[in-house]
Image: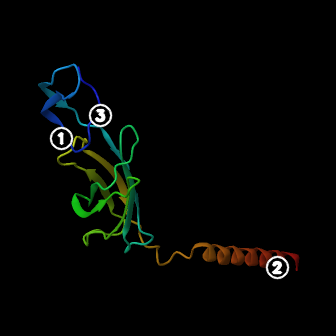
Amino acid sequence: DIAGALPASVPAGETTLTVAIDRRDAAIARATATTEVTVTATPTTLSLTATPPANETGNLTVTGDLRVEAGDALAERAVTLTVDGTVVETVTTDPTGQYRATVALPAEMAAGDAVTVTAQFEPTGANLAATTATQQVTLPTPPAADSGGLLTAIVESTLLQAALIGALLINVI
């Protein structure tokens, strides 16, 4: 059995391996051996964090990283980003295996919609395994027009206090 690491550029699958001993000026004869070997795909991991926009009309921020299962970063690799199955961008990982993109949401997306964001790594001509990461994101909805928030609560509390004090004064007099 032969075991060892091969460069990622060697594709997974069946391939021919040739080993040659070329020892000139040695007491052994030159020899060559050829055999079929199976190159297995190296497992990869892909992370994904999709941050919804601050308001219902903003863009989606997508970050993550791509690594081999052993933890080493995969630099300069293409990662395809989709929103609800529609490709929105293809990004390239940096030297540390990380990627970041700000993507415009498709026009048919509306406030309150839940969308599925997917990052996908599909190598070609390499012995790296494909991997996918998915996250569900709910787009923000605008605040209700009649909602006054904290200010409304303070005003209502003050009015209630004034009404109670007024009722007490009437009972005292």
Which numbered disc, 1 or 2, marks the residue that appears first in the sequence? Answer: 1
Name the spot of residue 19 as percent of width and height, x first: 17, 28
Expressed as whole percent of the image width and height from the top left, the position of residue 58 reads 38, 73
For the rendered model, the colour scheme is rainbow
Quadrant of image for the C terminus: bottom right
Q: Quadrant of the N terminus?
A: top left
**Residue carrying label 2:** 170
Most foreground residue, 164 or 114: 114
Which residue in the structure is indicated by mark 3? 5
Q: Earlier in the sequence, mark 1 or mark 3?
A: 3
Foreground residue among 33 and 118: 33
Spatial separation of the CA atoms under disc 2 and disc 3: 91 Å
Classify 10 Å Cα crowding around label 2: few (below 14), some (14-19), many (20 and above): few
Residue 36 lies in what quarter of the image?
A: top left
The residue located at (69%, 73%) in the rendering is 157
Q: Is residue 106 left or right of residue 50?
A: left
Q: Is residue 48 visible?
A: no
Q: Which residue is labeled 1 in the image?
A: 11
**Distance of label 1 from label 2 (alpha carbons):** 91 Å
Secondary structure under badge 2? helix
